[in-house]
Image (tube, rainbow, N blue to C red):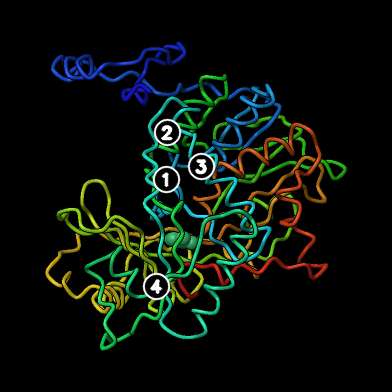
Amino acid sequence: MGVGGAHDGSRNGHRPTARYSAFALFTRGLRKSPWPRAWRAHDLRPSYDVVIVGGGVHGLATAYYLAANHGITDVAVLDKGYIGSGGSGRNTAIVRSNYLTPEGVRFYDRSVKLYERLSADLNFNVMFSQRGHLTLAHNDSSLRTMRWRAEVNKLEGVDSEVISPEDIKRLVPYMDTSASARYPILGALHHPPGGTIRHDAVVWGYARGADAHGVHIHQGTEVTGIQVARDRVTAVRTTRGDIATPVVVNCTAGWSTLISDMVGVRTPVATFPLQAAVTEPVKPFLDTVVVSGSLHVYVSQTDRGELVFGASVDPFTSYSMRGSLEFIEELAGHVLALMPSLSKVRLLRQWAGLCDMTPDYSPIMGPTPVEGFYLDVGWGTYGFKAGPVSGESMAELIATTKTPEIIATFDLARFADGRLVGEKGAASVGH
Ligand code: PYC
């Protein structure tokens, strides 16, 4: 795989082709020549076969698989900001499939499998590190849920098991697993295939792959309206002009209800901010992802040595993406309860992203009563891990107009029919 793939030449409409050796990269750096574009900019066409709203991992993956798997290339991806500027660039980059329901496990496991081969598929290093994922249990009821998840996971062929405090200590020597800890640890769900990924690289890789197949990526292009005639989508109105199209896919997060409202499709989604923070780099000491639902915290160490922390969503609906002192205070207290030796590590930065929460913590995917209008929304705090499988299955749905089995259970009608797919028990942290 070419390490310089992100910057391969696509300027002036040429397809990315070249691979750069380390030496070529070095000499390019010395020459200070500008990097070629990784994907092209285009004028907005008056019509496209498919318009995807949202240039995050879901929108870009859908565009990529439409083109790569089904030969549908007359596709536009619209983003009101820049690609990856929403949840895809704000998450804590955790990938796992240790869910609670069989449907959820199968779905997220397919995503892990696609992530495992994504660097090869896209010829672009997405830095997937399957370092293992630990969900701690501090009381009997969470230990019971971990056992339940382990059994469902095993039945679905996913590697998860409950391990003891001694095993945890071997995996994370810096963790306070003593009986005198403020929140003693009774065990953990250990999920070896879980890990972290470079989220920007995933976005750039899909964008570059979609572009190479002829997809148009339009950044800075906000959707202001969607035209419907006789219960069918006919056009999208944007800040750069109108586009005639028979197919619109809502792949947004945070603003998903605003887009669905444009065609009169109501979804049971409420938007909450989720905050995260990162420390200064320290020597590598943590080579697994650690989550404590009871303490509302998860932590991993990046390849650069920084510790990345996240927590529960803020306890109010909002579109604000500001950090708060309350979050940092609570986070620090909980992290130190788990790893007291981090007390001198300095936080560098905090930020927030928007999470579209559904009543059952599962997404809403599939067609709607408006013909040609598709939903891929309501991801809560699970969106990034599902990027590849969502893209693959939404592309299949659009290309064949048949709902793939793997997403059938996530349809919008389940809320009216009372067929919920409860995944709250698989949330990293309590909400
Ligand atoms: O579900 O693993 C998770 C997660 C991590 C950060 C937000 N959600």
Secondary structure beneath label 3: helix
- Identify which residue, 109 or 408, lies in the foreground: 109
Task: Tell me the distance, in whole angstroms, between the alpha carbons under discs 2 and 4.
Answer: 31 Å
Label pair 4/1, CB-CB below 8 angstroms: no
Q: Amino acid at mark 3?
A: Val
Mark 2 neighbour density, 10 Å: few (under 14) some (14–19) many (20 or more): many
Tell me the kind of residue under disc 1: Ser
Beta carbon at label 3 within 8 Å of ligand 1: no
Cα distance, mark 4 to mark 1? 28 Å
Q: Is mark 4 within 8 Å of ligand 1?
A: no
Residue 343 lies left or right of residue 294; in this view the side is left
The kind of residue tagged 2 is Trp
Q: Is residue 340 left or right of residue 254?
A: left
For marks 1 and 3, the one nearer the N-term is 3
Residue 204 marker:
2
Give the foreground label among 2 and 4: 4
* Mark 2 or mark 1, whichever is nearer to me: 2
How far apart, in angstroms, are the residues tagged by discs 1 and 3?
Answer: 10 Å
The quadrant in which residue 19 appears is top left
Q: Horizontal placement of 234 versus 150: left or right?
A: right
| Residue that carries the numbered disc 3 in the rendered image | 57
Residue occupying image coordinates x 60% and y 45%: 110
